[in-house]
Image (cartoon, grey):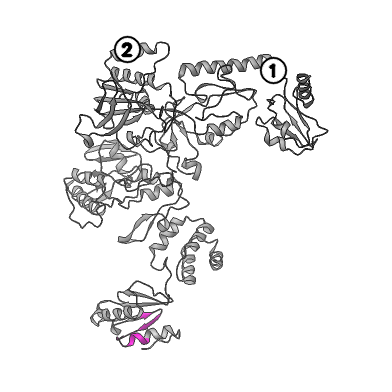
Amino acid sequence: MVKVTIDGLEIEVEEETTILKAARQLGITIPALCYNELIEPYAVCRLCVVELQRGQRTRLVTACNYPLRESVVIRTNSERVQRLRRMNIELLMARAPGAKIIQDLAAEMGIERTRFPIEDSDEKCILCGLCVQACSDVVQAYALGFSERGSKRVIGPPYDTTPETCILCGACAYFCPTGHIKMTDTDGRILHSELTLGPNAAISLPFRQAIPNVPRVDPDYCIHMKTGGCELCVKVCQKEAINFTELAQDSFEEFEVGAVIMATGFQDFDPTPMKQYGYGNLPNVLTADEFERMNNAASPTGGRIVMENGEEPRTIAILHCVGSRDEKYHKYCSRVCCMYALKFAHLVREKTSAEVYQLYIDMRSSGKGYEEFYQRILDEGVNVIRGKGAEVVPAYQKRRGEGGLLVCCEDTLIGKYREIPVDMVVLCTALEARADASEIGRKFNISTGADGWFIEAHPKLAPVSTTTEGIYLAGACQGQKDIPHSVAQGMAAAVQVVKMFCQGELLMDAAYAEIVEDICSGCRICNGLCPYNAISYDVEKKVSAVNPAMCKACGTCVAACPSGAITGRHFTDEQIYAQIEGILA
Amino acid sequence: MQQVETIIEKHKGRPGTLIPILLDIQNEYRYLPEEALVMVSEKLSVPLSRIYSLATFYKAFSLKPRGKHSVSVCLGTACHVQGSTLIIEKFERDLSVKRGQTTKDLSFDLEEVHCVGCCGLAPVVTVDKDLYGKVTLTKVPSILKKYRSATAEPVN
């Protein structure tokens, strides 16, 4: 331990502690641009210079990388230090005039402009090398480096092209103190973001409102999984919750099951293509999912309804049928939006004093207690306009409104065109079938309809079964539906499975295809034709065989068999001829 | 790239061989081809970014093909007083390149240097390892001619 005095305050620190760390322990701020505690200090920006006194002699040292070994006196803000820092910041201003952080630091020191010539007024790089060190020491991708020397020195990948070693982790951009390095989405390899609050990383919540609501490591993007380096998360996680040895043991396991309940759900319609609503372009235009997330007590806003600038909105418009009941996107009604839109209105009225406008085509509140809830919302003073929202534009484009946005619509009840100034717009996006539904469907042998939803065995009589025995449907994967209906269907599907298990045997249709082994030539034409995957090839006997439990007696194989080896039980040629003869007799 | 492999093999197994390897490649090809650097990076397990840093740092290395002969015209004080600016301009005209560039047929590099340490001979021009003192404008074509015909005999 060494005892040092910093700005008149005494502190005892462990040997080899840097001056900067000791000062921070005392609550003394020393400006530092190129310092990051996760990276070995390189002392380039020279802003952290301090005066070090040993005996009668004083000298200037950089606080970020000067290890304390003996009792010394340090002054972090003496006249000499300030003079030097001002000079350094002026030089940095000339080097990187585009960096806001340098301008701000200069302003703090009372410097408005630099005396030195500026070469490129947009330059932001101060050649601190944090990115180079992050790339090599932390990430171990070694994609970035210094090149040239002296006044020509630059930072970049070799030959100025995206190198193969770059894993697009974004560590360079993360560590860059001046914002010189930015991640751009060149080929869609950059990830989505969680409520657009910041760039997504390898550690994130799998999706909004995930259960359990804890982050997970995505091995596809984790730097450690790619290069073996990094492990910054392990260093910063105070709960020591990240265990890479456990993560590395992730494995796929195969289960044998007797029944499957498909409950793959729906996906949200992406309103970006509907340019008229400005989603993604205009501030404070949210999808219902994002708004719901904001309302959640565990959300980044803590459940408060706020705009991007942190203020509470004064007016909110909720637009129904975004992507639903729309010839261009989905013709169907998404069923759930009207009710959750009304719930949103209720939440807004409860949490804020904002005016709420609901723009609907038809209010579909059919359900137990739903109409009553609608009446209650009307009583709460929510403005309900019958007319689909036509356009959302920035207010200044049309006229100066009180909010930042203007919602244009035709109020069909009063027969007038209206422009409503609002602060925030919530788009009630359609429920749509998951993009991978047909792929999953193929795997499980269930077909999808024109809208992409899984098709049930019979719309009225078998709403949870599929054409494949043992596979059942539950929830929104079968069609747009709300929570009560999903729960009901899920329970029904569970009962179907239990029923099947209780019986211990499968009740089969008496009609199914049979292959006469003596005639079968083993050509395997039927194998690929069977829409239910019921026919397999017996390698030993060199003949095909039908699994009667899976066969649906469609007759495709019967018609296709070139050697006439397949017959449909109860549909043999003899039986049919006999029936015809019986009719004719 | 066969030669690169031989060069790497020659130096392999000893520490601190990166610069000697690069120097040998530079001598072999008169520049450092990208493929050669990639190969060195793979064989020595040194990141390409490190090699690139090194290759751009030292003036002895070049990433672009260099000329067969390197012409350096001294622009130091004594040579300058003796009119070396005119000499280098004459070289620029005769070789149709600017200083710091290489002729299209890759036969000559033209560089300016600042004092080669024999001011008594000003103005001084060096071609490869040969030195020419008291150069005049009329001597320039004959110097170049020697190297064009590839029979290099220094004249003093």
On the same chain, marks 1 and 2? The answer is yes
For this orientation, the residue located farthest to the right is A518
The chain letter under disc 2 is A
Q: Residue at x 53, y 29 (%)?
A: A449
Q: Which mark is residue A561?
A: none
For this orientation, the residue located farthest to the front is A585
Q: As displayed, is residue A130 above or below residue A527?
A: below
Residue hosting label 2: A376
Q: Position of residue A171 (x, y in %)?
A: 40, 44
How many numbered tags mark residues here?
2
Q: Is residue A266 visible?
A: yes
Q: Earlier in the sequence, mark 1 or mark 2?
A: 2
The chain letter under disc 1 is A
Q: As displayed, is residue A500 above or below residue A168?
A: above
For the record, the magenta segment spans B126-142
| Left or right: where A17 falls relative to B149 | left
Q: Which mark is residue A507?
A: 1
| Left or right: where A579 falls relative to A113 | right
Q: Amino acid at mark 1?
A: Leu
Q: Amino acid at mark 2?
A: Arg
> Which of the 4 quarters of the picture holds residue A466?
top right
Where disc 1 sits, the SS reads loop
Q: Is residue A232 magenta?
A: no
Distance Cα–Cα, label 1 vs label 2: 50 Å
> Which of the 4 quarters of the picture holds residue A369?
top left
Q: Give B64 or A416, whichever is nearer the viewer.
A: A416
Count neighbours of disc 2 (C-alpha within 10 A) and say few if under 14, some if 14 to 19, many if 20 or more: some
Where disc 2 sits, the SS reads helix
Q: Is residue B116 visible?
A: no
Q: Residue at x 47, y 40 (%)?
A: A222
Q: Give A325 or B64, whichever is nearer the viewer.
A: A325
Q: Position of residue A87 (x, y in %)?
A: 20, 52
